[in-house]
Amino acid sequence: MAIRQAALADSNAIFDLERYAYDYPTTHINLVKENFKSSFNEYYVLEDDGKVVGTGRLIRFDQNIRTSWKSMGGLGELATSPEIRRKGYARDMMDFGIELMHQSGYATSMLYPFKDTFYSTFGYINCPPILSVSVNPIQLRGCKIPHGYNFQRAPIKEGLDFFKYVHERSAEKHQGAVRRNDKRWAEMTIGDKYEIVIVFGRDGEPEGLMLYQNKGYSQFGDSKTVGTMIVREWYCLSCKARTAMLNYIYLHADQIINVSIPINPMTDDYYHWVQDRNIPTIRARRSYMARVIDVEKAIEGLPSSIEGEVCLRVQDKHCDWNNQAFKIYQEDSMLHTEKVENLECDTLVTIEGITALVYGTAQVDTLVCFGWIDGPVPPILSQWFPKTDMWMTEDF
């Protein structure tokens, strides 16, 4: 067995593995094929006697972690041939990916798990799921478009500059959000599956954007073919822009009887949007997992106004470079980390605990209950790393 970076000649083997593992429709595979020419160097393959039997993808992102931008590796599309499963080869690919991210200078990593218990053995922890609210558009009739605001529907290619503008500014405001590189934006424009609508404010600047897809018509047909709107992405730079987008959805009330809207946990007070019933339907659409790849890079530069200094000894079963004692201290309104050799550290933190602290997925008391912290718990950890919401919606 050998793992190597993919070449263009591996395309058919990769597509066949992904089709088989994930039941991708032909339309999706065609889109992947179109994008592969520019993104094949993000793929890696597992070979057995010259035959490709496994594949995976690693995408580099910049991620907003507590307002500090960190390099994050998005692992996706891990697939193996059924003939070689249960032999540890997928684990070999994960070990390869983690080592590759370390060598490439990544601070953190995220992925969408097929099974969280598999990835937890590599130090990944669960993050808050992406939630969506489902309503009938007629229930949004109380959301009136603000004076001076307007919206414009456009194909993604025509509205791409507006899309980039709104997406970038939204990412700057929200914990967990990522920036897209040029290749990622090009990938977004392949095919004509989705619509976008752009909301413009009084000054003519874009303040909101929605990427969505309509299926079916009104109440006609069975439950799978009735009029449905699925909002894939939803970015609002102001409350008025959000109200305008809700009004746009309401205008589909004669065409659509169910709309699914992703919820931003930091800003979306969805219970105020809906009329006629008190309890809208909330669903967990997808969940993701996170891991700190390099402790020093992940913590260095995180903002803090609270002075202090602690020593933590980190335990990481897969990354020897993290098995160190670290001094963490505040200076110049940010946190700094240093590896220390001869400093007494009575507090042991696993890599799962470090990841939860950095991403803010749990309170410090929860880490103690899970056994991710052992020994004296410095009170300042709760002040430096408070639990926080996340808004990570990138699909990879």
Image (cartoon, rainbow, N blue to C red):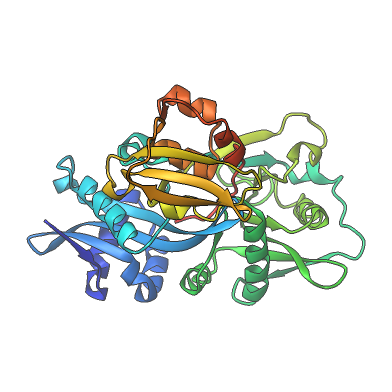
Frontmost residue, 134 versus 165: 165
User: Is residue 126 something that shows in the picture?
Assistant: no
> Which residue is at 69% across, 48% downward?
218
Examine the rendered structure and indicate whether residue 209 appears above or below residue 303. Answer: below
Find residue 154 and report its image quarter: bottom right
> Which residue is at 35% across, 55% downward?
77
Examine the rendered structure and indicate whether residue 74 appears above or below residue 126. Answer: below
> Which residue is at 47% across, 62% downward?
61
Examine the rendered structure and indicate whether residue 320 appears above or below residue 154. Answer: above
Please state the horizontal and vertical placement of residue 230, each as a whole percent of the image. 61, 51
Image side of residue 358 versus residue 251, left or right: left
Instruction: Identify the image quadrant of the N terminus.
Output: bottom left
> Which residue is at 59% across, 75% downward?
157
Find residue 362 and report its image quarter: top right
Image side of residue 269 versus residue 170, left or right: right
Frontmost residue, 278 versus 319: 319
Instruction: Identify the image quadrant of the C terminus.
Output: bottom left
Please state the horizontal and vertical placement of residue 373, each as a whole percent of the image. 43, 29
Find residue 248 and report its image quarter: bottom right
Q: Residue furthest front?
A: 342
Please state the horizontal and vertical placement of residue 105, each as a whole percent of the image. 37, 62
Image side of residue 111 versus residue 272, left or right: left
Q: Residue furthest left?
A: 49
User: Is residue 357 something that shows in the picture?
Assistant: yes
Please state the horizontal and vertical placement of residue 306, each as a whole percent of the image. 64, 43
